[in-house]
Image: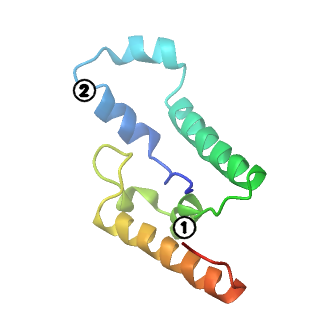
């Protein structure tokens, strides 16, 4: 399993609301940051399920957060990793594999 890369809530909101009445969307959403909180909650739920089921987990979210300045790793929609973001994901998987080798975890 993997955690989700974080998103940029404002950029995602701006992209999603293109052509929509933003005030009406905010009435339902309450805050732009609600987008980030729900996405973060989903990612933490993945972590919890992995722990409860003893399932291997690649912490993609943590890898992004370690780099800081998130905007430079995301596409214009604020949600999908760009080429540089994909490199972070690759790095997270390579680190996971290296750690598994050191710990002697069998990867199938």
When the figure is inspected, residue 53 is found, relative to residue 67, above or below; the finding is above
Pick the quarter of the image with the C terminus: bottom right
Q: How is the image coloured?
A: rainbow
Residue 101: x and y in percent read 62, 86
The part of the image, by quadrant, that contains residue 100 is: bottom right
Looking at the rendering, which quadrant does residue 71 occupy?
bottom left
Q: Secondary structure at mark 2?
A: loop
Q: Which SS class for mark 1?
A: helix
Q: How many marks?
A: 2
Query: Residue 83 appears at what percent x and percent y?
Result: 28, 66
Coordinates of residue 13 in the picture (x, y in percent): 38, 32
User: Which residue occupies 36% across, 41% down?
Assistant: 11
Q: In the displayed structure, would residue 8 be above or below residue 101?
A: above
Q: Residue furthest bottom?
A: 102
Q: Nearer the viewer, residue 94 or 75?
A: 94
Q: Residue at x 31, y 14 (%)?
A: 21
| Residue under pointer 2 | 18
- Judge the density around disc 2: few (<14), some (14-19), many (≥20) Cα neighbours within 10 Å: few
Which image quarter holds the N terminus?
Answer: bottom right
Closer-to-camera residue (80/105): 105
Question: For the point 64% across and 63% down, which residue is it?
Answer: 56
Badge 1: residue crowd in 10 Å (few <14, some 14–19, many ≥20): many
Residue nearest the observer in this picture, 34 or 100? 100
Left or right for 7, reference 50: left
The residue beneath circle 1 is: 63
Determine the residue positioned at 46% across, 39% down.
9
Left or right: residue 18 compared with residue 7: left
Against 77, residue 55 (above or below) is: below
């Amino acid at each position: 399993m993997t955690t989700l890369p974080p998103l940029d809530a404002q950029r995602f909101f701006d992209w999603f609301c293109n052509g929509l009445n933003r005030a009406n969307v905010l009435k339902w959403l309450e805050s732009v940051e609600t987008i980030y909180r729900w996405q973060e909650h989903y990612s933490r739920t993945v972590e919890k399920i992995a722990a409860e089921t003893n399932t291997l987990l690649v912490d993609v979210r943590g890898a992004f957060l370690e780099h800081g300045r998130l905007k430079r790793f995301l596409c214009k929609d604020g949600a999908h990793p760009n080429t540089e973001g994909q490199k972070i994901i690759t790095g997270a998987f390579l680190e996971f594999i290296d750690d598994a080798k050191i710990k002697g975890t069998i990867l199938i």
